[in-house]
Image (tube, rainbow, N blue to C red):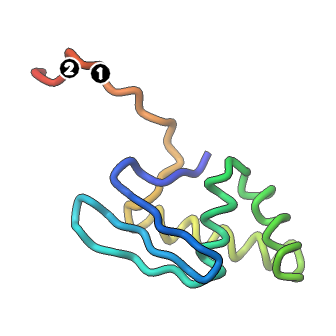
Amino acid sequence: MWRLCESTHPVLTDEGGALLDERTGRWTQLTPTASAAVMLLLAGATEDEAAGQYATRYGIGFEQAAADVRTVAAALTAQGLATTAPLSRGRGWWGWWR
């Protein structure tokens, strides 16, 4: 499942958005369509479900929508802002000293 990294903080609207990487302090600006793709992916949808909703929203074919959603997901993953790894449970409160 695709998700943002714990150090990534989104500010998303229908008019666009931005992601703050707290590790670097840098903002990544998103276009309105990229912001929509991220919102759909964060809603818990698979990439295919997100693509279907994206296609409906923008009135485009499923193949184009799937390519758009995959491109956004891959770009943010490559930048270290998102991941497909399972959510880390950490080592608990006692792990701070290890």
Residue 27 located left or right of residue 53: left
Is 34 drawn above or below residue 19 in the view shown? Answer: below
Q: Looking at the figure, which quarter contains the N terminus?
A: top right
Residue wearing tag 2 = 95
Q: How many marks?
A: 2
Percent of width and height locating residue 45: 73, 51
Amino acid residing under circle 2: Gly
Amino acid residing under circle 1: Arg
Percent of width and height locating residue 89: 40, 27
The residue carrying pointer 1 sits among few (fewer than 14), some (14 to 19) or many (20 or more) residues within 10 Å by Cα, namely few
Using the image, tell me which numbered label, if any, was put on residue 73.
none
Residue shown at 23%/59% (left/top)? 23
Is 34 drawn above or below residue 52 in the view shown? Answer: below
Residue wearing tag 1 = 91
Distance from label 2 to label 1 (Cα)? 5 Å
Secondary structure beneath label 2: helix
Percent of width and height locating residue 2: 58, 51
Residue shown at 47%/62% (left/top)? 77
In depth, the one of 78 and 31 nearer the eye is: 31
Is 71 drawn above or below residue 10 in the view shown? Answer: below
Residue shown at 41%/61% (left/top)? 81
Asked if disc 2 and disc 1 are in contact, CB closer than 8 Å, the reply is yes
Secondary structure beneath label 1: loop
Residue 76 located left or right of residue 53: left
Q: Residue furthest top?
A: 94
Q: Looking at the figure, which quarter contains the C terminus?
A: top left
Residue 22 located left or right of residue 81: left
Residue shown at 60%/65% (left/top)? 38
